[in-house]
Amino acid sequence: MLIATWNVNSLKARLERVTQWVSENKPDVLCMQETKMKDAVFPTMTFAEMGYESAHFGQGQWNGVAIISRVGLENVVANFAPTIEPDLEARIISATCGGVKVVSVYVPNGRALDNDHYQYKLEWMNKLKQHATIFAKPTEDLVIGGDFNIAPTDDDVWDIKKFEGATHVSAPERKAFLDLCDWGLTDVFRDLHPEPKVFSWWDYRNGSFHKGEGMRIDFLLATKSLAKRVKSCEIDRNARKGEKPSDHVPVMITVSEK
DNA sequence: ATGGTGGCTGGGCCA
């Protein structure tokens, strides 16, 4: 089973690249973020013709998350679980795909440490942990895939000195990330790849990709029962090349059957 | 280099 996550930065602008990537990689499940479209215009038929069911939680010009699956797509939950105060933005959708509980998340950016949006980000991470506890047990097969807008360690940014006073690397954000993992989730990529400076995002500006100035902020976080069956985890750096790339690239895991 | 690029849009915000 191949499970992937990708912040596509507008599915409308990226549809050709996304369908091309799906055709080549044939993920069983793909979590997407920043579709930036309303549900009514989500390309359900395009994916259906490729053999995928779709679940989309969109709002329009910003945010928007989706899960597409060719191994079943059941029990879809748009937004946080019903007992949690709902987010006003479309940033989380959950479903069960082929026996695995899957959550696609687009964690708020935070903007700046003194910005209200930063508090919103921290609260959002707390709600995500609550959502996990409601949506699944730590003993079940669960993967949370998405753009977390948090670099968990200094190895996950190109130069920590450039991030003094910035979001994505602050101690409270990193603690929120660890708190979520402490519930029972593993950063599968880091487990299999100890090497530093492997990134999933590069700013469009200033030739960042070619200078190697990126961050690893996109993750597949798996519960133990799932993580122990993961055979490989890759970040598809090639997806940042060529015409009209997203600023993020896909992260993918292959999981062996039980 | 207080800029740069890209995607919403249709001027300015967001990342």
Image (cartoon, rainbow, N blue to C red):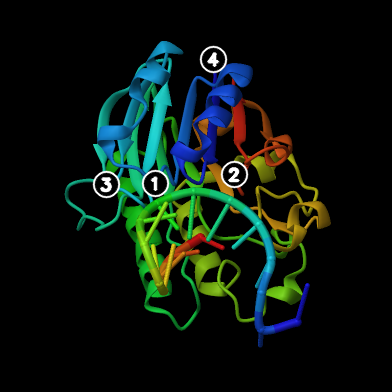
Chain under label 2? A
Q: Which residue is mark 4?
A: A257
Q: Which residue is mark 2?
A: A246
Question: Which corner quadrant holds the N terminus of chain A?
Answer: top right
Amino acid type, residue under disc 1 in the picture: Lys
Q: Which residue is mark 3?
A: A79
Q: Which mark is residue A171?
A: none
Q: Position of residue A105 (x, y in %)?
A: 42, 46
- Residues flagged by tags 1 and 3 on a common chain: yes
Who's the residue at 75% across and 49% down the image?
A198
- Cα gap from disc 2 to disc 1, whole angstroms: 13 Å
- Mark closest to the chain's N terminus, 4 or 1: 1
- Cα gap from disc 4 to disc 1, whole angstroms: 34 Å
Amino acid type, residue under disc 3 in the picture: Asn
**Residue A205 as seen in the image, left or right of residue A54:** right
Mark 4 or mark 1, which is nearer to you? 1
